[in-house]
Image (cartoon, rainbow, N blue to C red):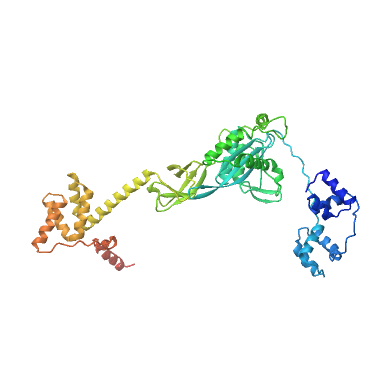
Amino acid sequence: MTISPELEAQILRYFHAEHWRIGTIASQLKVHHGTVSRVITQAGLPRVGAPRRASRIDPYLPFIRETLEQFPRLTASRLYVMVKGRGYSGQPDHFRHLVALHRPRPTAEAYLRLRTLPGEQGQIDWAHFGHLDIGRARRPLMAFVMVLSWSRQIFLRFFLDARMENFLRGHSAAFETWVGVPRVLLYDNLKSAVLERQGQAIRFNPTLLHFAGHYRYEPRPVAVYRGNEKGRVERAIRYIREAFFAGRSFADLADLNAQADAWCAGEAADRRGPEDVTLTVREAFALESAHLMALPDNPYPTDEQVAVKVAKTPYARFDLNDYSVPHTHVQRTLSVVADPRQVRILEGQTLLATHARSYDRGQCIENPAHLETLAAHKHQASQHRGTDRLTQAVPESRDLLVRAAERGGHLGAITRALLRLLDRYGAAELRVGVLDALAREVPHVNAVRLALERRREAQDQPPPVEITLSEQVQRRDTPVQPHRLASYDQLTEADDDPA
């Protein structure tokens, strides 16, 4: 606790001139007794009062100090067990209080003020700003922050995750906004930048290296547990939390990013520059922008590319949602290429489908044309299956359908009616009816039905009862063409030939 010089002088006067006790001074001046003791000790004057009484811990203080020097982070509870085993009879609570007075304090580390040249360095980091609920999905709200070390110009862009694609999108957007690239970018040891590190041996993320080579800057990670080396971006994140995000309302992610762009170009750019107080950040950036490296001719591709397996249903699963594809591409592995607004599905270089991207979960994003084509295909396939079953049971029905088509008949309705007659009368009777209709040159289902009714009445049989059987049972009655036995005779003759 820091106290004023007036209060410190008052404590010393009461203690040395008035001979007040430490507790009395603390209660009267409304300060902690430890603060009073510190002021008296730091004043460099001898302590007035009765000498300190002997304590049970005194014989063990050399052992305690030696142990704490060797193991500064050793807990008081563990040290109490060690001292108790050596004969100490005090209580653990009082022991913990006494040990705190003798524990070595870490030496305060001094830091050099780091200065950079204009256009030389930028610093980058992610910051977490809670979550966004989008439909049934709960997605993290992550802020990509890049700061130019000399001018303190801030770039801020919000994303719904911290994946590598969004990491690179943040870089590209910052470079395009500033129309230039700093020569060095400092990173924390996050997985998007550093995959593995052993001391000074660093294995960079190959995607980041390729990206850095495209924009011709040097990626440089800071030392482990040395966040002060990128203190400019750390302070910028704190400034964003306090001056921009606190109490701010927004409709969606696009609205939040639009507000962030306006804030970076307005209020954040008009603040006083820390390097030169006579310049604002906007004026300092105007000077620094001339020292940034030029952008390459083509931007780096930052689309997400994922291989997905399409199952029996014509949908490709990507980022918690299903996107429709043409039904002709089921049971295949396709490529999904996505940007923040659009999802494209490709087979090789062929574009199959394009959809607006959804950040909800469990949604089915469909192209109506895909479903209409599938429905038409299913209807046509159903008709083909019926025709195949009819012609296998009664081959003469094919001629009936051909002649009906020549007269403009509805083949689907005729096929369904003949299949119902097949289920009621059987294949043998239906064949007789079809041959009768063909002989009369009346290729219509009514002619077949009339012929079957005349045969039933002539044979004095009751009307047939239609029995609905499953498709599996119906297939058992499908006529099978007998195999010619001459092939077996040829095999027997081949066996009788001498070797």
Percent from the top left, x then y, of residue 285? 66, 31
* Residue drawn 16% across the image and 50% down it: 444
Judge by depth and name the residue closer to the eye, 170 or 379.
170
Q: Is residue 203 visible?
A: yes
Judge by depth and name the residue closer to the eye, 309 or 321.
321
Left or right of 185? Residue 63 is: right
Task: Give above or below for 355 relative to 490.
Answer: above
Left or right of 318? Residue 271 is: right
Q: Determine which quarter of the picture holds residue 59.
A: bottom right
Judge by depth and name the residue closer to the eye, 262 or 289.
262
Q: Determine which quarter of the picture holds residue 480.
A: bottom left
Percent from the top left, x then y, of residue 145? 62, 41
Left or right of 102? Residue 305 is: left
Task: Give above or below for 359 relative to 104.
Answer: above
Task: Give above or below for 237 relative to 176.
Answer: below
Percent from the top left, x then y, of residue 177? 59, 34
How many marks do you count on the picture? Answer: 0
Q: Is residue 347 visible?
A: no
Image quadrant holding the C terminus, namely: bottom left
* Residue drawn 37% across the image and 44% down it: 368
Percent from the top left, x then y, of residue 132? 54, 47
* Residue drawn 18% across the image and 47% down it: 404
Left or right of 451? Residue 252 is: right
Judge by depth and name the residue closer to the eye, 405 or 242.
242
Q: Determine which quarter of the picture holds residue 461.
A: bottom left
